[in-house]
Amino acid sequence: MSMASVERELKGHHVLAMIIAFFGVIFGVNFLMAYLAESTWSGLVVENGYVASQTFNSDLARARAQEALGWKVDFTHDQDSVMVSFTDARGAKIDTLNLTGRLQRTVTDKEDQVLTFAWLGSGLYAAPARLKPGLWEVEVDGKGEGVADYRKIFRFVVKAE
């Protein structure tokens, strides 16, 4: 028994179809990736970069003054809350702050949360938060009578269980 093989001739319309299919897949994947990139995050860190740049020097001076206070600020979290503790340069707990905060993902605004901290005593403040696994940032703003205003950003990772 012999097997007869049938040879097929490669013609121009076959080559054209292969080229169109190849580039069709390339363009399709590129358009899909561009759409997903554009629809998930705008890329904006601030609304207006020029306006933000005008306050750079005052923001830098405020950050240096805050650093000169010598406060020790510790941050911790668990699955349903974030906690911040404040100690001044002499080691005394700071209990007179009114803390607010903003919890956000680093690449999207879909899970942003506004935090209202409660004082727990001994310089410790806590706020409820819904934390899913991934990278997070919390921006803490503290104001109080008799103490300097304070602002700090903490970046942390919540691990999947």
Image: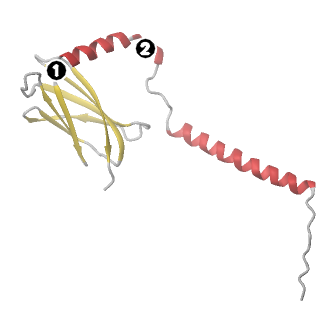
Q: Answer with the quarter of the image where residue 109 lies.
A: top left
Q: Earlier in the sequence, mark 2 or mark 1?
A: 2
Amino acid, disc 1:
Gly
Q: Quadrant of residue 71?
A: top left
Q: How is the image coloured?
A: secondary structure
Image x and y of residue 37, in percent: 55, 39
- Which residue does the image show at 19% across and 28% down from the upper left? 99
The image quadrant where one finds the C terminus is bottom left
Q: Which residue is mark 1?
A: 70
User: Mark 1: which secondary structure?
Assistant: loop
Q: Amino acid at mark 2?
A: Ser
Q: Residue at x 20, y 19 (%)?
A: 149
CA–CA distance in space, label 2 to label 1: 27 Å
Residue 141 x %, y %: 24, 25
Q: Position of residue 13 (x, y in %)?
A: 90, 55
* Dot 2: element: helix
Q: Is residue 76 left or right of residue 138?
A: left
Residue 136 vertical placement versus 61 (above, below): below
The residue where tag 2 is placed is: 53
The percent position of residue 64, horizontal first and vertical second, equals 26, 15
How packed mark 2 is, by other alpha carbons closer than 10 Å (few <14, some 14-19, many 20 or more), is: few
| Mark 2 vs mark 1: in front | 1
**Would you say 78 lies left or right of 159 here?**
left
- How busy is the neighbourhood of tag 1: few (under 14 within 10 Å), some, or many (20 plus)? few
Left or right: 156 as drawn, with respect to 119? right
Q: Residue at x 11, y 18 (%)?
A: 145
Q: Quadrant of the N terminus?
A: bottom right
Report the side of 8 relative to 115 (left or right): right
Against 37, residue 98 (above or below) is above
Res 32 label: none
